[in-house]
Amino acid sequence: MDTSGYAKLFLTESREHLVEINNALLALERDANSDAVDELFRAVHSIKGMSGAMGYKSVTELSHELENLLDKLRNGKILVTTQVMDTLFTSSDALETAISLATSDKPRDLIVNTLVDQLRELAQEPEEPQTFTAEFQVLAETKGAAQAKAEHAPRHVRIDARRLDNLMNAVGELVIVRDRLTLISAQIDDPSLSEATLKASQLIGNLQNEIMTIRMLPVWQVFDRFPRVVRDTAHLLGKRVEFIIEGKEIELDRSMLEEMGEPVLHLLRNALDHGIELPEERVAKDKPAVARLTLTAERDRSTVLIRVSDDGRGIDPDLVLPRAIELGLIEEGTTTLSDEDLIRVISRPGFSTAKKITDISGRGVGFDIVATRVRALGGSLEVRSVPGRGTTVTLRLPLTLAISRALLARVEEEVYAIPLTHIVETFSLAPGMLQHVKGREVLVIRDEPVPAIRLRDRVGLQKGNGQSSQVVLMELADRRAGLVVDEFLGQQEIVMKQFDAVGEDSSLFSGATILGDGAPALIIDPTTLV
Amino acid sequence: MPAPERRLLLFDIAGKIFACDMSAIREIIPFQRVTRLPGAPSTVCGLINLRGTIVTVLDLGARIAKKPCDRESGSILLVPFGEKLIGIGVDEVRDLQSMRPDELQKDGDLSAFDSGIILGLAEVDGELAVILDIEAIVNDVLGKSAAALEGGES
């Protein structure tokens, strides 16, 4: 019997239950009379049943004791106290740890004795427990729930995510071949070939869309772990926060979903740490003691907007203005700051308005990390801040990472792909545009000097017959640079592939892609250039 | 019972015969268009497209004879590297030959090579072939970056 297959299934299912448990705990903490206890009981009961079958001793033991306590809570035999809540939260964490230990490559049992004792102690009550009725209820409920599930369940198939990745890769190749085919067909210019090519091209487009849709996952898969983090962080900081999530059902490609969790978490922590004031400070400012922190997901054409909004103190212009003047972004004596300048200042590495160093979001590292991450994902970000009223940070992310567009550029005989995400504009090199200032080459673009980078030098090519004649203006955070190449070969959809890097300079490339003629081309990583 | 025979793949590098254990080789393909990898040492040819995946190709000629292998008529030996493949460029693939382990000579003048990548010598058609440890060569060239890759991959 392949138990490892069952272990994986157990892990997947229990993760879903753990998320339910965490959410129900948060609901219970807000309102002790809610249905949360029932939900908790069901989720814990499911884990107990599954782990028993798998022989995960510590998981079974812990969920059994939890179940007992929850049963007493459900029947009103004991009350929801802070002590009970804390123990429930700890138990939920322990359950998660026990599950990951039991299902790891080297299965181990978590030592749960102390927690089990604690749970037993809390579950003690003066009267004799009416076990019979309780058991009866449980059975009736689980059966009812199972029935409801079976009736409404859409027909789903569980697929290994790697298979979807492979499929996506294959479609990526197909998209590239389609571009090539279209090109050849245009050259040959035969009506029947053109018609067939167009038809194939449409079908490939449909296929790509279909597979993209299959890979789409709702954002709640990532968002659902945030309420717990927000709660814990707020507790730690002594702040009171109402956390609202909107647009949970919005879908993103798996590749993007996995990557965007961290930057969003950073923004939430930033808001809790720097944005939201302590309750007494809020009351003194005539604000409600409980702050509002909102996380919203919204679809906008082919992008997704993720918004983190708080009603805290906002970004203090008195702290940002001097820094902006110091950086030369605005002229001295200016008293207002545009949103664009605000982003430029706060996304500088090392910028922080925090007066106190905390272990929540650290000092000075935060926003620049978020900005860099988001741009690396091909997204952009916007900040709106009203002093005293709050801050809103909006991330705009592409739906997928799997396929992107790039500009193909040639130097001598070599072709490189430059992702479009960081390209501001492209133009031909005009006479006098390239100048030497203080021994460095700069491009003068509309009277503004921009550092010039010759791709030829960067990839270690000797000067040959090629003529540097075109420039790609790239922008990263607030830095700009002009990349000088021989010739542009047009845009193409590319599928990023990894290769085994050798040598130090390989970091200049984020991966490789396959061109229409089948040859590999390196993808330039703008973050290492600019 | 005699020890099992070893199957050796014979190939040329810079006019000399070399050999490696055939069991280390997954596939042999003719040299194809290689994309140069800027910044990589001379022991790396570059990247090829192998049925849609990008494979890094090492230059065995540059590694052991200080002479790049023949990219016109040479061959690429594909060897497993983790879950992926690594290509090894050689001048010309000659022959496949069976050999008993006792025919392997551990002595002889090997001072011209670093011993870490040599398994021994064998006499083939009156010539002395150097038997290479392909795995050691791959690890030697890619070792550092492979370690970095494993540490950084999520």
Image: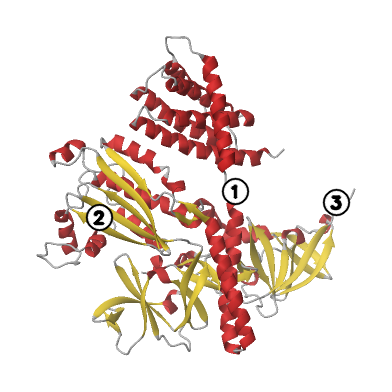
| Residue of label 3 | B3
| Residue A424 position (above or below residue A287) | below
Question: Can you say which quadrant of the picture contains the C terminus of chain A?
Answer: bottom left
Q: Secondary structure at mark 3?
A: loop
Q: Earlier in the sequence, mark 1 or mark 2?
A: 1
Residue shown at 41% from the left, 62% from the top: A303
Q: Amino acid at mark 1?
A: His
Q: Amino acid at mark 2?
A: Phe
| Residue of label 1 | A156
Q: Is residue A215 left or right of residue B99?
A: left
Q: Secondary structure at mark 1?
A: loop
Same chain for the residues under marks 3 and 2 in the image: no
| Residue of label 2 | A351
Q: Residues within 10 Å of mark 2 (few under 14, many from 20)?
A: some
- The residues tagged by marks 1 and 2 sit, at their Cα atoms, a distance apart of 48 Å
| Residue B1 position (above or below residue A184) | above
